[in-house]
Amino acid sequence: MSSSSSISRNVVAALALVTQATARLALDSSSNVAVYWGQNSINQASGPNAQQRLVDYCANTNIDVIPLAFLYEMTTGTGGEPVINFANQASDCQIFAGTNLLDCPTIGADITTCQQQYGKTILLSIGGATYTEGGFTSSAQAISMADHLWELFGPVAGGTPTTTSTSSKSSSSTTTTTSSTSSTSSTTSALSTPTSTSSPFTSSSGFISSTSRSGKTTSEPSTSTSLSTLLLTRTVPVTTFSTRLTTLFFTATLTSIPSSIFASPTTTTTPSPLLNDTLTLPSYVNSTFTNATISNTTITNSTINNSIITNSTINNSVFINSTITNSIFINSTIINPQILDSTLAKRQSAVLRPFGSAAIDGFDLDIEAVATNMVPFAQRLRELMDADTSKQRYLTAAPQCVYPDVANSALLSSTVHLDAIFVQFYNNPCGVQAFVPGAATQEAFNFAAWDTWAKTVSANPAIKVLLGVPGGPSAAGLGYVDASTLAGIISYCKGFSSFGGVMMWDASQALANGGFLADVKSALVGSATKMMIRGMSWR
């Protein structure tokens, strides 16, 4: 015979399977479970209890929300980029050249699976106990960083590429080659790893430099054979446009590395030549392409060596390479942005996306020391997320239970609309360990104070307050209680309309702690579980 606890867990699992498609941060619910992932606080390098891939926790039906911990540097990161850390799960990540910013395509793929297959809400948590920058020097700096983080972790502007590119901040060019013979031509698209220079064009030496994620640089002559051998990573369809230049035929395949596959590319105000050879084109030969020019080109003895096509825009495309051979064809090989290979989705404007095309569902502010200008920072994040109508996005905070929380007092008393707060009821005298069972008025355990804040101070009077607890005995220095004790505390908290569920630190601890997670979910769903148990007993 099964125990009532195991029956409850089974019922909770059944309920979760029924509602899995809609599992998320539910702002009208008191049964949310948010579990932080990323720091492997159980501190095991390997084995079943060590922190696993993100998607493994998303598959757990007792979890609704996963904040990724942490982004812990914003203003002091190398190369002006923020810094994220995911402990043992960073082993599959690379580092963008010239920065300390991780490039994590596996985590990006997991985020998408978590959202689309399991219906989870994925937040990026900023701060943590090791955050020491102290905020921002000005509101302008705070707003600028909010904009930048939205570019890095929000939805891809203008489109949704499917994979992560591996460029460095200053390296986002595409190299292409063309081979022509006699009156026919063949075109090969060789997509390089990003070059180490800021120019998207072939260097004057005729060599192409490529930089890998490890920063290693190699050089090869810019010939069709060597480039195809060295750089060919994808072959994609091309679109060809032709126009007659009096006696010559101009055949162009258009390409750019725009900020997204649907956006116009970035162009310079001063066109940059592709090659150094400067020749003279007869005045009677004119291009019929709007905004396209061929200049400084000479036709001599029917042998045309190198042509320059300026960095001009045609139909949201940019010419980046051109070769004229011993024929009547001028061939320019580039990729149409509408069919741009997804691995080239990194922006020409040097936006480095750690999770590729994956976009988080919002931000969590886990600021545990005094930080300046967090209000304009949070307000800007709120504005950016609200402007995106594609889906609901969330802004949360994770204050200590001591009220008022000094580190977050400005934010929590501001006009910034927060959706939920994950109050840390541990490592403090106001934590869950101070709860007195059966006492209508709690002297030390102060969930009531946070309920009052939610209703009278918060800019969002409907905000949800989640009860933050350690997920296991070693997850915190103070505040762990077993699931049975926690069930009584949850029952007490349900008496407050602001109660939104339970937050746990962290995933590695909670999953290693037997049935703790399932028992907590069972205590949260409460009446629904009892109804199903009654229904089962009638059969």
Image: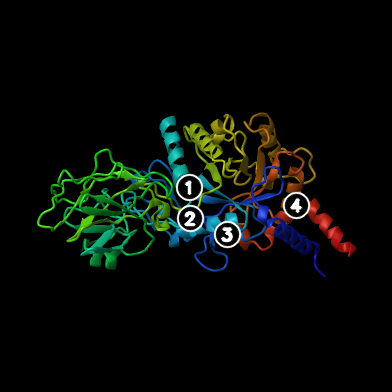
Q: Residues within 10 Å of mark 3 (few under 14, many from 20)?
A: many
Which residue is label 2 attached to?
Answer: 86
Element under disc 3: helix
Position of residue 127 measured from the top left corner of the image (x, y, whole percent): 49, 44
Q: Residue at x 19, y 52 (%)?
A: 307
Residue 101 appears anywhere in the view: no
Which residue is label 1 attached to?
Answer: 153
Query: In which image quadrant can residue 90 be found?
Result: bottom left
Q: CA distance from mark 1 to mark 4?
A: 32 Å
Badges 3 and 4: C-beta atoms under 8 Å apart? no
In this view, the residue farthest toward the left is: 301
Q: CA distance from mark 3 to mark 2?
A: 12 Å
Residue type beneath disc 3: Ser
Q: Earlier in the sequence, mark 3 or mark 2?
A: 2
Circle 3 or circle 2, nearest the eye: 2
Q: Residue at x 57, y 65 (%)?
A: 49
Element under disc 2: loop
Circle 3 or circle 1, nearest the eye: 1
Element under disc 4: helix
Left or right: 304 as drawn, with respect to 388: left
Residue type beneath disc 2: Phe
Q: CA distance from mark 1 to mark 2?
A: 15 Å
Element under disc 1: helix
Which residue is label 4 attached to?
Answer: 525
Circle 1 or circle 2, nearest the eye: 1
Residue type beneath disc 4: Val
Query: Which residue is nearer to you in this view: 142 or 291?
Result: 291
